[in-house]
């Protein structure tokens, strides 16, 4: 859903169209893999418990847990990739999820890809903007 406030110029509408097309093109089909972010994961919870719990919704392709470099414990969130998008949708719809006695929240991952990169060359010290081919 896109909310657009009226403006005298067409810039707002162009921006809304671009945002909508970026989001709608990133919506997966049922056969594509889909990633979810898990938050509020207990520090004692491991990949095996997460995979065992979420395998009831479909085949889990990968689980990534993010660790603190100083303590060596994971930071309380993880990413979970299902083989199919409909498995992720089913997991999102059947909330709440409780793992190791703690409620775990899920968020859908929607990638935002930028086609413009800024870089500096050695011959020219000014920054140049270059559009890469799609």
Image (cartoon, rainbow, N blue to C red):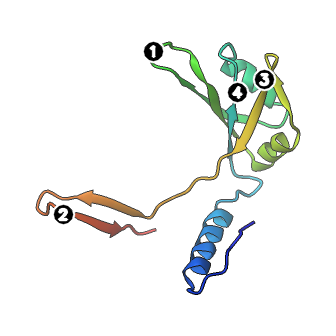
Question: At x 11% / y 61%, what residue is drawn?
Answer: 123
Foreground: disc 3 or disc 2: 2
Q: Bin the neighbour count of mark 4 within 10 Å (Cα to Cα): few under 14, some 14-19, many 20 and up.
A: some
Specify the quadrant of the image occupied by residue 128: bottom left
What residue is pinned by disc 2? Answer: 126
Tag of residue 70:
1
Question: At x 74% / y 19%, what residue is drawn?
Answer: 49
What residue is pinned by disc 4? Answer: 40
Name of the residue lying farthest toward the left: 123
Report the Cα–Cα distance between label 1 and label 3. Answer: 28 Å
Question: At x 64% / y 52%, what residue is drawn?
Answer: 110
Tag of residue 38:
none
Q: Bin the neighbour count of mark 2 within 10 Å (Cα to Cα): few under 14, some 14-19, many 20 and up.
A: few
Of marks 1 and 4, which one's residue comes earlier in the chain? 4
Foreground: disc 4 or disc 3: 4
Tag of residue 52:
3
From the top left corner, tell me how far across and down residue 112 is, in percent: 55, 56
Of marks 3 and 2, which one's residue comes earlier in the chain? 3
């Amino acid at each position: 859903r896109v909310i657009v406030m009226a403006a005298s110029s067409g810039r707002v509408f162009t921006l809304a169209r671009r945002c909508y097309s970026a989001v709608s093109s990133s919506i997966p089909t049922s056969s594509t893999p889909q990633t979810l972010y898990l938050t509020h994961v207990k520090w004692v919870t491991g990949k095996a418990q997460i995979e065992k719990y979420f395998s009831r919704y479909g085949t889990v392709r990968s689980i990534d847990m993010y660790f603190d470099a100083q303590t060596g414990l994971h930071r309380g969130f993880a990413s979970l990739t299902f083989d199919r998008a409909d498995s992720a949708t089913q997991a999102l719809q059947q909330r709440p999820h409780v793992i190791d006695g703690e409620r775990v929240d899920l968020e859908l991952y929607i990638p935002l890809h930028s086609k413009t990169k800024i870089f500096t060359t050695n011959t020219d010290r000014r920054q140049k903007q270059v559009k890469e081919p799609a």
